[in-house]
Image (cartoon, rainbow, N blue to C red):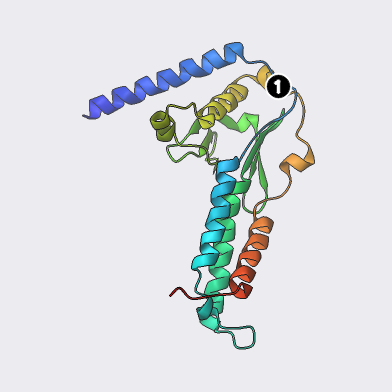
Amino acid sequence: MRAGRAERRREARKERRDRVEELAGVMTAPQAPLVWRAGWRGKATAAILCAVFVLLADHQDVGSLAHPRPGGLISAVWSSLFVGWVCCWLALWRVTADRDGVYIRRLLSTRFLPWSRIGRVELRQDGQLEFFGQSPEPMTGLFAPPWLSRVTRRPGTGGRAADTLTVMALHGDLRPTERAERAQIRGGLARWAVLLGVGVYLAVEFLPYRPLA
């Protein structure tokens, strides 16, 4: 059994190398930076999550502005901020590759990885891109996981993004020729998560509440 798994891993690595080499043979250096970001599915999921949280939140446990319940208030604020962070992670993640390296939008800021620190990029089973290099690097993105692409028989953009980033890391002449604009790399998710969390909390606090019969 172990020998079978090891053989499958070797075959998968060989298939990946062949795919990357084939892509490198037909790929040309893009002029503008390449950007991968959340699509409509991620944004729709975030909107639905916010709506469900507001509808299912325990309005009575918070109390009122005049007589708030401390425990319920703390729980409502904390859970609203958590929901805001999850929704921003689903809807606002972004990966930008330019001539200098890769910019990854994180919680507090955008992290920059120069090409010299990237050896290869792989798509994990959970749909995130994982960067491998000289030191442990972050994971980012939220693409359709490989198993879902196999089930739906539709090509996944995550695998293509991982292969493209790997090709650019290995071949300097295939990297974008321009630098990313500030608007493409600025800011992290924290400010958006706080704003959304406050909005969700205010919706829970002030929307008319009618208990289900």
Residue 121 at least partly seen: no
Residue 42 at least partly seen: yes
x, y percentage for residue 92? 63, 47
Question: In the figure, residue 207 lies in which quadrant?
Answer: bottom right
The outermost residue toward the left is 1
In the rendered view, tell whether residue 94 sits above or below residue 15.
Answer: below
x, y percentage for residue 160? 54, 26
Dot 1 surroundings within 10 Å: few (below 14), some, or many (20 or more)? some
SS category of the residue bearing label 1? loop
In the rendered view, tell whether residue 123 sits above or below residue 22.
Answer: below
Along the line of sight, which residue is nearer the eye, 114 or 49? 49
x, y percentage for residue 199? 65, 65
Residue found at x 56% / y 25%: 166
Name the image quarter holding the N terminus. top left
Question: Left or right: 72 with respect to 5?
Answer: right
The outermost residue toward the top is 25
Question: Left or right: 17 with respect to 204?
Answer: left
Residue found at x 59% / y 59%: 84
Which residue is label 1 attached to?
A: 30
* Amino acid type, mark 1: Pro
x, y percentage for residue 122? 49, 31
Question: In the figure, residue 119 lies in which quadrant?
Answer: top right
Residue found at x 36% / y 20%: 11
In the rendered view, tell whether residue 40 sits above or below residue 30.
Answer: below
Along the line of sight, which residue is nearer the eye, 191 or 112? 191
Along the line of sight, which residue is nearer the eye, 158 or 200? 200
Question: Left or right: 4 with respect to 149?
Answer: left
